[in-house]
């Protein structure tokens, strides 16, 4: 038996404490970084686990796996499902003609059974958009043909839901192409409607800044707001930035500040983003070093989740009781909930405890 297969087999044994049945009134997702297959096109590090191995406490319970292996994705789906995670948002990249780093999504689709787990895309549009309107149309056409017809693709209000990493980058891409952001949204919606869908539910990423959240986003026709992650807390303006606290508590404060403003002042629905932390040291460190080593203890993570849940209950229509956690496996940026050799299932246990049905 190959070493990778042995790792998967051993990891299966670790799931025995989870109950098979799981229900919840909340829809919780997690972002998935598809960057763990040696030599995959688009990797910053050709051997991606190499810089992570300098931090052995981050080793996944599955070992240093390849995310193109359906057996690996099968086990990850099982863990997600049994902890109460209802959908996976795969980081998704486009070079103007083709996607890349799609291997994990392909393995996910090969390993799942119908009705097993919802999935969607986080369009990583913070990388400069290559080309013009023809390339944009080609990208949307790819979404429609390859993903949207899958019954397990995440839908909101009957529309396939796509997360956009950054509203600012979306507006900049529109400017580069020579159109308005609303034209990009309208073109995508028209293409979806021509294929028999009611449109696309675009969820734009932004912190709590008035210009983007209540100006550009609704004017562009985006359906909702969320974020991949937050490093700073805002309440409408850049001058409102709050840097209270140290380590994970500082990060948690930033999230809470953004949450509160976007829910009380924002015009659009809001999918609440959550995080287990941030630590970019394996990939060279953050521009602001004190942001690193901001890893939640299990107790801190539970408190973070409970506040998000409280806000979902306080704003059920605006949040749809829907949230997304950064991240499943962003080991390079130090944001992960995937079981590790050191911490086991600590994070997944907290998700199940907070959002599960007893």
Image (cartoon, grey):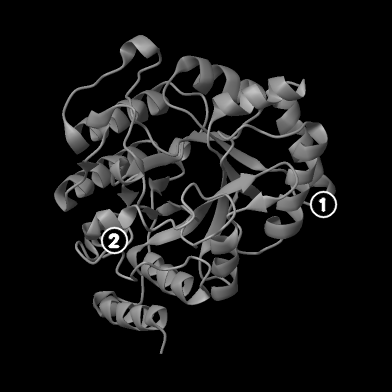
Relative horizontal placement of residue 238, taking residue 270 as reference (left or right):
left
Q: For the point 56% across and 69% down, which residue is it?
A: 107
The secondary structure type at the circle numbered 2 is helix
Give the percent coordinates (x, y) of residue 94: 66, 45
Q: Which residue is mark 2?
A: 348
- Rounded to the nearest whole Å, what is the CA distance between mark 2 and mark 1? 38 Å
Which residue was labeled with disc 1?
195
Q: Within the image, what quadrant is residue 339 found in?
A: bottom left
- Residue placed most toward the observer, 243 or 87: 243
Do callouts 2 and 1 mark residues in contact (Cβ within 8 Å)?
A: no
The residue located at (24%, 62%) in the rendering is 349
Quadrant where the image shows the N terminus:
bottom left
Query: Horizontal placement of 319 versus 204: left or right?
Result: left
- The quadrant of the rendering that contains the C terminus is bottom left
Determine whether 68 is above or below 263 in the image: below
Q: Nearer the viewer, residue 320 or 227?
A: 227
In this image, 187 relative to 252: left or right?
Answer: right
Q: Examine the image and state in which quarter residue 114 appears.
A: bottom right
Q: Is residue 260 visible?
A: yes
């Amino acid at each position: 038996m190959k070493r990778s297969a042995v790792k998967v087999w051993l990891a299966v044994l670790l799931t025995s404490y989870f109950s098979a049945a799981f229900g919840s009134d909340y829809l919780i997702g997690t972002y998935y970084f598809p960057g763990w297959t040696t030599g995959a096109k688009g990797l910053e590090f050709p051997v991606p686990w190499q810089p992570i191995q300098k931090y052995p406490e981050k080793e996944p319970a599955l070992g240093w796996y390849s995310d193109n292996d359906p057996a690996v994705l099968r086990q990850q789906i099982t863990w997600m499902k049994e902890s109460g995670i209802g959908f996976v948002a795969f980081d998704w990249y486009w070079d103007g003609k083709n996607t890349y780093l799609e291997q994990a999504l392909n393995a996910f689709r090969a390993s799942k059974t119908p009705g097993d787990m919802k999935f969607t895309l986080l369009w990583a549009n913070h990388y400069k958009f290559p080309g013009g309107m023809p390339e944009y149309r080609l990208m949307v056409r790819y979404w429609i043909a390859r993903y949207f017809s899958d019954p397990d693709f995440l839908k909101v209000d009957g529309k396939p839901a796509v997360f956009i990493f950054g509203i600012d980058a979306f507006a900049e891409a529109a400017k580069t192409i020579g159109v308005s952001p609303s034209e990009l949204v309208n073109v995508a919606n028209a293409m979806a409607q021509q294929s028999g869908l009611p449109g696309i539910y675009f969820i734009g990423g932004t912190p709590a800044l008035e210009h983007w959240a209540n100006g550009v986003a609704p004017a562009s026709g985006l359906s909702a707001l969320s974020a991949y992650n937050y490093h700073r807390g805002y309440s409408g303006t850049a001058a409102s930035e709050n840097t209270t606290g140290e380590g994970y508590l500082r990060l948690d404060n930033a999230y809470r500040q953004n949450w509160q403003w976007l829910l009380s002042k924002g015009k659009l629905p809001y999918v609440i983003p959550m995080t287990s932390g941030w630590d970019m040291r394996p990939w060279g460190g953050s521009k602001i070093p004190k942001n690193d080593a901001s890893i939640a203890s299990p107790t801190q993570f539970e408190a973070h989740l409970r506040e998000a849940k409280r806000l979902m209950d306080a704003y059920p229509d605006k949040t749809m009781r829907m949230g997304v956690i950064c991240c499943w496996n962003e080991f390079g940026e130090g944001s992960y909930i995937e079981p590790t050799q050191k911490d086991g299932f600590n994070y997944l246990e907290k998700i199940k405890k907070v959002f599960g049905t007893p």
